[in-house]
Image: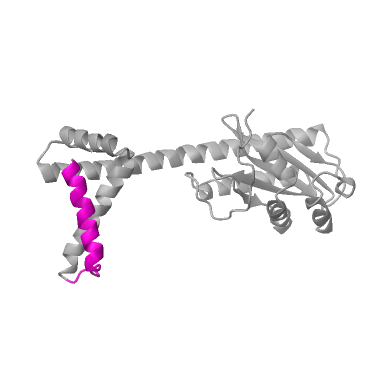
Amino acid sequence: MDSWPPENLVNHRSWSSVWRAEHAIPVLDSIIDVARELVPGTHVGICIAESTGALSTLAGTDQLVFELDDLQYAMDEGPSLTTVRDGHTVIIDDAESEHRWPRFIPHAVNLGLRSQLSVPIEVEEQTVGGLTFYSTTHTHLDTDRLAHARLFAAQASLAVTQTRRESHLAAALQSSRTIGKATGLIMERFDLDDEDAFERLSRLSQMSNVKLRDLAAHLVKQSNDLRHVADASTGHVHQPSAGHATRDQDEATDLVVRL
């Protein structure tokens, strides 16, 4: 099974991957609340890795979860990171006698950690995060509790998967709208029908080795910038500097000529 590829995972609270994590957070919050009820005396958290390899704690039952997670991110080691990197379950029965993660453990014990269970969250056979149970007592993690943890991790996986699908769809729709706008600009400029205009846009994409959606976004942006320059003469918007306006016009003209 493939684990998350990056070598170094660091804390990254600002989420920048394609899916919008905040859409999944209410579901993840519900999952950890139920998990804490079924495994009393634990502090439960969910961390997710983004495409850059950064980890973010998206859900935690209390402040201790965030403190212990942040400590692992800062130390670049710990059970949760091992789970995400290697894609397997990690158990600490007695943190005070634990010799793995020598930088993390002493600080974690000072924060009150005594036992821990981290299980991977998987999407399409890749480990994308982890569900962690922290305990301030020497909790014995029996078979039933491990089964519960894996069940909750599976539920978190479903939430992440669904949110990613929705975000990919939203991104695809946005790209489609942008390409449609760019096609419309070409139709207007060259008096073409939609098929011929799209064919020209596609040809320019191939000639310039620029993705179609990126080229379309650039054309639309240039059109909007030129429109703002024109509107500025009526006082509707702040007029850009002459040099900036000229650069925009030159770039737009170059694209039109290449069409």
- Relative to 14, say whether 115 is above or below: above
Q: Quadrant of the N terminus?
A: top right
Quarter of the image with the C terminus is top left
Looking at the image, can residue 46 be seen?
yes
Name the residue located 29 percent from the left edge and 49 percent from the top edge.
218
Residue at the farthest right position: 97
Question: Residue 81 lies in what quarter of the image?
Answer: top right
Tell me residue 109's x, y (percent).
84, 54
Q: Nearer the viewer, residue 22 or 189?
A: 189
Which portion, as a residue range, is magenta?
A: 235-258
Q: Main secondary structure of the magenta part?
A: helix
Say whether residue 46 is left or right of residue 18. right
Q: Position of residue 257 (x, y in %)?
A: 16, 45
- 19 in relation to 74, above or below: above
Residue 128: give x, y in percent of width and height. 60, 39
Asked whether, in this view, residue 189 is left or right of residue 64, the answer is left
Q: Position of residue 148 (x, y in %)?
A: 73, 36
Q: Identify the residue at image location x=29%, y=43%.
A: 215
Determine if residue 223 is in view: no
Q: Is residue 195 above or below residue 223?
A: above
